[in-house]
């Protein structure tokens, strides 16, 4: 072999088998750690999406009450899986999530008045230990969705 060939071979940037195995083991560990966290993140994303849908229904009920100059009631069915606003399409809360309502006046009913105010209360979308609170202010009827607790 010529001297230039020896130098080129000695300076080539190849990897040894051990280096490749170490990289593969590290990749496997990282992939495993990410895969363990994925189901929890999926529940969080789904819960947030359901809470947004419920918030949207409440805002639409308020807008309808103002626009049509009539009260609009939002009722939570006892099983906690369906919210019904009179005159609007219902929202379904799929399992494993459930909705719980704490209404200020009547159980499982929040009413929006034509002036935009509401009877007030809170709806929690929950799954296990996670829940997404939605608050309805009494004077203004403002609907606000907090971060997951």
Image: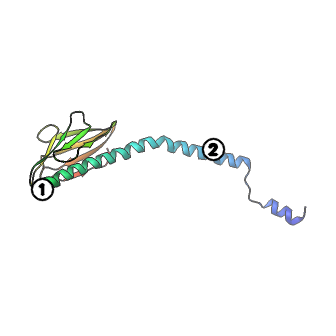
Q: Answer whether labels 1 and 2 touch (C-beta < 8 Å).
A: no
> Which tag, 1 or 2, sits closer to the chain's start?
2
Across the whole image, how many numbered discs are drawn on residues?
2
Q: Nearer the viewer, residue 93 or 87?
A: 87
Residue under the image location 16 percent in, 45 percent down: 86
Task: Decide: is 124 above or below 70.
Answer: above
The residue labelled by disc 2 is 25
Query: From the viewer's perspective, is 42 left or right of 145?
Result: right
Residue 95 point in image, percent of width and height: 33, 36
Q: Secondary structure at mark 1?
A: helix
Residue under the image location 25 percent in, 36 percent down: 80
For label 1, count other residues whose C-alpha is less than 10 Å away and answer few (under 14), some (14-19) or many (20+): some
Q: Quadrant of residue 39?
A: top left
Residue 92 point in image, percent of width and height: 28, 41
Residue 64 point in image, percent of width and height: 15, 53
Depth check, mark 1 against mark 2: the one in front is 1
Q: Name the outermost residue toward the bottom.
A: 4
For label 2, count other residues whose C-alpha is less than 10 Å away and answer few (under 14), some (14-19) or many (20+): few
Q: Secondary structure at mark 2?
A: helix
Residue 68 point in image, percent of width and height: 11, 55
Q: Nearer the viewer, residue 75 or 21?
A: 75
Rendered image: mark on residue 128: none
Q: Nearer the viewer, residue 12 or 115?
A: 115
Residue under the image location 22 percent in, 41 percent down: 83
Query: From the viewer's perspective, is 83 left or right of 25?
Result: left
Query: From the viewer's perspective, is 51 left or right of 122?
Result: right
The residue labelled by disc 1 is 66
């Amino acid at each position: 072999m010529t001297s230039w060939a020896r130098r080129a071979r000695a300076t080539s940037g190849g990897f040894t088998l051990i280096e490749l195995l170490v990289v593969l083991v590290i990749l496997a560990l990282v992939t495993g750690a990410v895969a363990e966290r994925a189901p929890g993140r999926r529940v969080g994303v789904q819960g947030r999406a359901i809470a947004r849908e419920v918030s949207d229904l409440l805002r639409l009920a308020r807008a309808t009450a103002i626009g049509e100059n009539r009260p609009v009631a939002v009722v939570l069915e006892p099983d906690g899986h369906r919210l019904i606003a009179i005159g609007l399409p219902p929202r379904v809360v799929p399992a494993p999530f459930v909705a719980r309502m704490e209404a200020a006046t009547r159980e499982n009913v929040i009413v929006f008045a034509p002036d935009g105010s509401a009877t007030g209360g809170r709806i929690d979308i929950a799954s296990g230990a996670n829940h997404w609170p939605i608050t309805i202010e009494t004077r203004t009827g403002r609907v606000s969705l907090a971060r997951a607790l």
